[in-house]
Amino acid sequence: MIEINGITKRYGNKLAADNVSFTVNAGEIMGFLGPNGAGKSTTMNILTGYLSATEGSAKIDGIDIFENPIEAKRRIGFLPEQPPLYLDMTVSEYLNFVYELKGCRLEREKHIKEICDVVKITDVFHRVIRNLSKGYKQRVGIAQALIGNPPVLIFDEPTVGLDPKQIIEIRNLIKKLGKEHTIILSTHILSEVQAICDRIVVINQGRIVANEKTANLAHAVEDRRRMTYNICGPQNEVLKVLKSIPGVVYAEALGQRDSDSVSYMIESAENIDVRKPLFFAMAEKRWPVIGMDVMGMDLEDVFLALINDRSKQQNKKEKKGARA
Amino acid sequence: MIAIYKKELRSYFVSPIGYIFVALFLAVSSLLFTYTTLYSGTCEVNLYFTFLLYIFAILIPLLTMRMLSEEKKSKTEQILLTSPVSLFSVIFAKYLAAFTLFAGTLLASCLNFIVLYFYGEPNSVIMFSTVLGILLIGSAFVAIGVFISACTENQLISALCTIVAILATLIVGTLANYITFTPLRVVLKWISVFERFYVFTYGYFDVVALLYYVSITVIFLFLTVRVFEKRRWE
């Protein structure tokens, strides 16, 4: 449905996007993940025809955005980082304007009403946009993207600046929309993509560092499992036993948590689940395990992990190349 | 394109700017009319329109100053530029909205001339061709204003630059008379909006002048498109 091929964007000497390529299949929700300034917005702006690329091509539904922009744009609903709202209009005026702007041919009143129901803005339909809360403004922005029922939806950081309740509501809305649309969604929050997306593309400094199914990426970054355990027992002996468990590569006492348990940090080797053997080893010694926690990786850890992997792979390739 | 045209016209009248423009235009033009024709007891409208052209330097920027600068500042241009319409039609719609308000107000101000028919025998042909000339010049000025507003995010800078640009095209013809260096004088006279306007005040319809003003309009609208294209590429 969406095909990006070798998109490069140069601002003077700065490379905002460096040979970015990916495809999104019909019906997929793709999470576009990266820190601020990584090139997410640039890529999305290119994809929607707002910016042009220095090199490369982008196709929506087989139509090239540079060669046939009007037809391609007809197939995209876009919510930019800052929703493009005319603050002096009412929601009703604004949506009618967008309807006419897009040259929409669906039955007007019914179509607009349906969209308002989906994004839940019916109760503010006749209010001036300037006076709406941030959450409502964001929804009006989403409503605008939905007009004309385009097959592709592109949302640039749709949950930024919203309160936790609104974030959950918008996420659920996007999930719902994902049943009938192909969606690209950018964010810098890892848990957000894990919650909504089928696939994750990670971008850093203009380059794509990962392009995986969500489950695979989560697995990839959790390969080197780091866990914390709370165990009741004599610290030195527990540590000795922990280190003897096959698969444990590193164990360290983090300190006493309450009167009789100590917490330990354990790192296991890739692809080995040490939780069960650990449980039995402790049970044998009759040291109760009273807590276990997989240390979640945050976005920075994921980047470090991915970038390290990359450089390792590159080194291997280079070595192979040198030998050959 | 019609959607943008309607939106622009509407935006003049939900903010004070449209009312200020119409009120100022009608008030100043009536004053000018009173002093240049009624008080001097003549049916000639040349002088009236000559003065009016100078007033345009203030009036036209009111219409165009926020046109594209505001959209850029509030990022609303993103919806226009990512919707399935061509860049030229976006800009043309905006120009057309400003021109509509300008032309409408100009025609309304022509109601003043009815008085002349009661007390004298004005030459309707001259009057008609002069108004036509003014419309054409106004069109060129609006296009210049649209172009300048595309170049900046700041309404004030946009307005000031437009004032200077319009004044320059008005004054340059007069300045040219003092210049002895012929090539420069010819060039300045060519730029001057007034040079071609006088033909209309004699009651002639000059195709060359028509082409001249229409070309200026088209060129500046085209340049505006280029400004946006350039921004996309840089």
Image: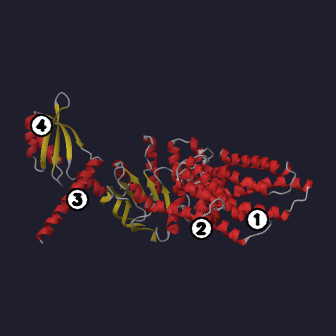
- The answer to whether the residues at label 1 and label 3 have Cβ atoms under 8 Å apart is no
Badge 2 is on which residue? B183
Q: Kindly report the distance in space between the C-alpha atoms of the residues bearing marks 2 and 1.
A: 26 Å
Q: Earlier in the sequence, mark 2 or mark 1?
A: 2
- Which residue shows up at 53% across the image and 65% down it? A74
Q: Where is residue B143 in the image (x, y as percent from the top left)?
A: 62, 60
Q: Where is residue A78 in the image (x, y as percent from the top left)?
A: 49, 57
Where is A319 relative to A191, above or below? below
| Chain containing mark 2 | B
- Three-letter amino acid code at the position of disc 4: Arg
Q: Which of the pair B24/B68 is nearer the observer? A: B24
Q: Kindly report the distance in space between the C-alpha atoms of the residues bearing marks 2 and 3.
A: 67 Å
Badge 1 is on which residue? B200
Are dots 2 and 4 on a single chain? Answer: no
| Chain containing mark 4 | A
Q: In this view, does B44 lie to the left or right of B68?
A: right
**Tag 3's secondary structure?**
helix
Badge 3 is on which residue? A310
| Chain containing mark 3 | A
Q: Where is residue A53 in the image (x, y as percent from the top left)?
A: 41, 64
Q: Earlier in the sequence, mark 3 or mark 4?
A: 4
Q: Crowdedness of circle 3 by 10 Å Cα count: few (<14), some, many (20+)?
A: some
Q: Which of the pair B126/A14 is nearer the observer? A: B126
Badge 4 is on which residue? A286
Where is B93 relative to A291, above or below? below
